[in-house]
Image (cartoon, rainbow, N blue to C red):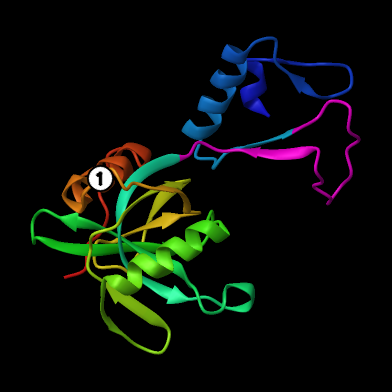
Amino acid sequence: MASARVVGSIGPDGRLKFLSAAEASAFYDAAMAAGHEGLMAKSLGAPYEAGNRGASWFKIKRAHTLDLVVLAAEWGHGRRKGKLSNLHLGALDPGTGEYVMLGKTFKGLTDTMLDWQTREFLAREIRRDDLTVYVRPEVVVEVAFSDLQASARYPAGLALRLARVKRYREDKQAEEADTLTSVRQIYAAQSGGAGPATLG
């Protein structure tokens, strides 16, 4: 744990402790700079159990947010059967004038949101297959995600990691959503300036 020599101190019990939020933040920044996804923290009063991460443990990861446009939604399963659930998320590519998909998510959706989006998406339907309803790109959703990764699966060459819905942006038009330019800027910042490989 070389970073422990920079900030914080290791007590006689072997635990790294911080005396201030600034110290903890500096340790986190050092971990990010070293290429780690985040940190794990544990309550000081909870025992350590090898191989078991219980309620006293939690992940510390920086989350980004983007306002993206819903391109389609998949029918749900189980308790979500009969409701449109898994969202196809995209951003406008200013170079082509077309929306490009960046990933999917069904996380963060409440029952109220599921009811609302099923109604709204069906009103905007342009076509469907057995699993998916494709919609006019009009609905803007705020999405939190851990980071972006290079992906050959999507035409933009990028995909959201650990995406979850925060809220629908009924105050925004699709033209006001983040574009692929914004997405690429986030990717460049997290990867030290390297851009994604695009499909050609």
Q: Is residue 117 left or right of residue 172?
A: right
Residue 38 shown in magenta: no
Which residue lies at the image location 70% right of the left edge and 15% below the top edge?
18
Q: Which residue is mark 1?
A: 172
Q: Is residue 160 left or right of residue 126?
A: right
Q: Nearer the viewer, residue 152 or 147?
A: 147
User: Mainly helix, strand or loop, the magenta region?
Assistant: loop
Residue 105 seen in the current view = no
Q: Is residue 144 left or right of residue 155?
A: right
Q: Position of residue 186 (x, y in %)?
A: 31, 41
Q: Which residues are magenta?
A: 42-63
Q: Position of residue 5 (x, y in %)?
A: 65, 17
Tell me the quarter of the image containing the C terminus: bottom left
Depicted 131 relative to depicted 145: above or below:
below
Occupied quadrant, residue 2:
top right
Q: Position of residue 99 (x, y in %)?
A: 20, 63
Which residue lies at the image location 89% right of the left edge and 44% below the top edge?
49
